[in-house]
Amino acid sequence: MTRHIIKSCLVAAALLTSAPAFAGSLENLERERSIMVSYLLDADLNVAQREEKMAFSKRRLADLERIALKDKALKESRSPLVLKVFKNYEMSFLVHSATESGRSIPTHWLEAIGLSTSDLMNARSMK
Amino acid sequence: MKQNGMRHGRHGVLPHKVMIAAATGFALLATGPALASTGQGWQPQISEKILVLPQKHLERAVQRDFAASPLASNMLDIDRQIASEVTNIQSLSENQHLYEGDAAIEVKHQVLAGKRAYIGLMGDQIALKRKKLETQLRLYRHLARTARRNASNSESQREIVAAIDTAQQRAEKVESALREDLFYSTNLPESKFGEDYAANRQAIESLRAAIANHPLNRAADGVDAPRNKIEELQRLEMNVEAQLAILDMEDEVLGHMAKLLSLDAMAFAEEVAERAYLENEQMLDAPDLRSPAAGVKLFVSF
């Protein structure tokens, strides 16, 4: 009985450790992207602070996007998460897709989530 | 009995040739084109990594691998021997009319012997060719199986690869613009990674251009060009099978040659036998000086 339990634990441990480990490139990208978005949404920052923080973040994000795009290990992956990241190029690769669309990153991101400039201009604060 | 023995002793060369000619004919009829039992084979040293090479390089790589095998050197050696036999037969046949008597018979015999050697060598060569083609066919089939296995990756993985490729292409298109944008919009020096990335990207681009323009990398022309690795391997298999079919026909041609040569050998044997018989006849027609009666004239002088 004890032996069976040990065996089951070992199998479970093996399964858990061999779970699809897609490269850290996507994790790093996602971390930096969330930082960038947090700067975008941070109401405590003034314009100059936001610009400064976003400039640093943009440079880092550009590098991380390049790393993820060139990551050969991702092609071996069968994870639906990887597929989702690359299918959703506009949101995943913010710096590249913003350059492609010729817009700033905030505009690009807001439009990608369905908020256009006119939507924002027409918005009224609800009390 | 003694006379006969002496006669045979005197003209012993002819029956000897008859025997050789007859033996040649029987040997050819009995064995036909002999299969090469000597020589080492060809163990392809090509790994499955060859499948990543551009399509038309595959066949060249296989040919190079074969050229380095003992089988290839055996075939070359036999080719040289065949060329030498052909030269010998041609030279003898051209000069055959210059000889008379025993010399003419000897030349004829040499021609027959040369033809026999030629057929034997040709049979060996066909056997080696068959060995080569069968090995080649096995190799192509193995590579085709591997290519099919590689191609049958799961649908999801193919989808991922396609999505990554699309993303890479989109990113490539804006890379120069992005670099400029980062330089002007952030007012920050480029990161170490960014610098190295740009330098390597430029190097990769120039190497890609060189690869694309390389004469050996020109795409196969025409609408009939194979579309993928599996199709190309199937075509190579078909070519090898066609060559094997040609070898079967060459075998048949060689069989007919052997039959014709055996008939020639038998005709030659008969010719030599007839000649020997006629010479014996002449000997019998000549006055027999060994009997006392034939020598009477030597004593009777009137």
Image: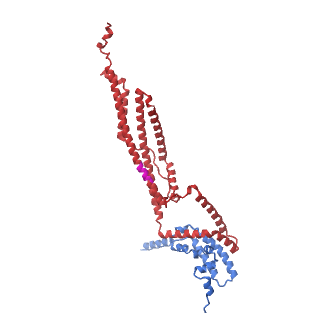
Chain colours: A blue, B red
Most distant residue in the front direction: B223
Dominant SS type (magenta): helix
**Residue at 43 percent of width and 28 percent of height:** B99
**Observer-nearest of B238 and A55:** B238
- Image: B11 above or below B143: above
Looking at the image, can residue B68 be seen?
A: no
Q: Within the magenta stretch, is there residue B63?
A: no
**Observer-nearest of A2 and B155:** B155
Residue B82 location in percent, x, y? 46, 40
Residue B272 location in percent, x, y? 36, 29
Quadrant of the rendered image containing residue B261? top left
Residue B166 location in percent, x, y? 55, 69
Left or right for B51, reference A40: left
Quadrant of the rendered image containing residue B255? top left
Image quadrant occupied by the N terminus of chain B: top left
Image quadrant occupied by the C terminus of chain B: top left
Looking at the image, can residue A4 be seen?
A: yes
Residue B149 location in percent, x, y? 46, 63
Most distant residue in the bottom direction: A127
- The part of the chain drawn in magenta is B239-246
